[in-house]
């Protein structure tokens, strides 16, 4: 702790999340700085929201246990490969977050002084048929307003993808079509809010997400959670968007 502010953990060697070696930073902080750049720590990229999940009821929201840190850890590896030693990625996601809940942790994100915040919210709201889209829009705008306090980081809103209902017993194809349409509608809210805000971009995942049941099933587990391939697909899209911004 320096001056009361939390400092990102610095990993001075490559950490393999699949190895038996302990993560020296703990499970929630992924830092990919090389020894030669440790003295000039760049402002980090911080991920927050429900970005570890594809969407679902609160009781079923959890990170895919086969990928520590979900797609955020894969994103960190991708950015390290694309920009060696130049990017620190800090994971502040929480499965089950809503736009309203995430607002309570904005001060924690500000203490990290990020240059960019990757926000993934809406999956939990999307999972409930009676969710109020206008309330979500209002909470999202309030969240972005808090995040954009000085020093204002760039903000990337990661779009939602629906669950694969074919992986859940006794679910009809008609229900998949309904949840797909809800996903499109809620993603439009993300796009509209991002367009209205300066320094905010919407990353559309749903347009290129497979519609074929077999292809979709490779991207999710038990319907609600992203698989290894799903995490890798999302991470690659976020990585490309960050590098090109």
Image (spheres, rainbow, N blue to C red):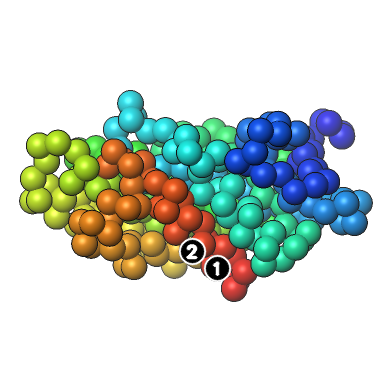
Residue in the foreground of this view, choosing between 14 and 76: 14
Residue at image mark 2: 237
Q: Please state the horizontal and vertical placement of residue 10, each as a whole percent of the image.
A: 80, 43
Kindly identify which numbered label has been placed on residue 240. Answer: 1
Residue 185 falls left or right of residue 198: left
Residue 207 falls left or right of residue 78: left
Residue 198 falls left or right of residue 169: right
Please, which residue is most extreme toward the top here? 59
- Residue at 75% in and 63% down: 84
- Residue at 63% in and 53% down: 76
Q: Secondary structure at mark 1?
A: helix
Is label 2 in contact with label 1 (beta carbons under 8 Å)?
yes
- Residue at 67% in and 67% down: 82
Q: Is residue 3 visible?
A: yes
Q: Quadrant of the C terminus?
A: bottom right
- Residue at 39% in and 46% down: 226
Q: Secondary structure at mark 2?
A: helix
Q: Is residue 199 visible?
A: no
């Amino acid at each position: 702790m320096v001056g009361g502010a939390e400092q990102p953990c610095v990993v001075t060697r490559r950490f393999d999340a699949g190895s038996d070696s302990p993560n020296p930073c703990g499970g929630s902080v992924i830092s990919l700085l090389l020894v030669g750049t440790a003295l000039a720590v760049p402002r980090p990229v911080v991920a927050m929201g429900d970005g570890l999940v594809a969407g679902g009821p609160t009781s079923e929201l959890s990170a895919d246990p086969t990928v520590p840190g979900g797609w955020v850890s894969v994103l960190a590896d991708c950015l390290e490969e694309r920009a060696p030693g130049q990017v620190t990625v800090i994971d502040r996601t929480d499965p089950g977050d809503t736009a309203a809940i995430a607002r309570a942790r904005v001060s924690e994100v500000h203490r990290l002084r990020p240059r960019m915040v990757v926000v993934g919210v809406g999956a939990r709201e999307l999972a409930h048929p009676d969710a109020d889209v206008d309330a979500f829009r209002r909470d999202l705008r309030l969240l972005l307003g808090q995040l954009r306090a000085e020093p204002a980081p760039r903000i990337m809103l990661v779009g939602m993808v629906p669950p694969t209902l074919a992986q859940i017993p006794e679910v009809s194809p008609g229900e998949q079509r309904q949840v797909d349409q809800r996903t499109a509608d809620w993603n439009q809210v993300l796009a509209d809010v991002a367009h209205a805000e300066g320094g905010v971009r919407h990353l559309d995942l749903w347009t290129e997400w497979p519609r074929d049941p077999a292809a979709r099933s490779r991207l999710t587990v038990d319907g609600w959670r992203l698989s290894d391939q799903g995490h890798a697909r999302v991470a690659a899209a976020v990585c490309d968007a960050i590098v090109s911004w």
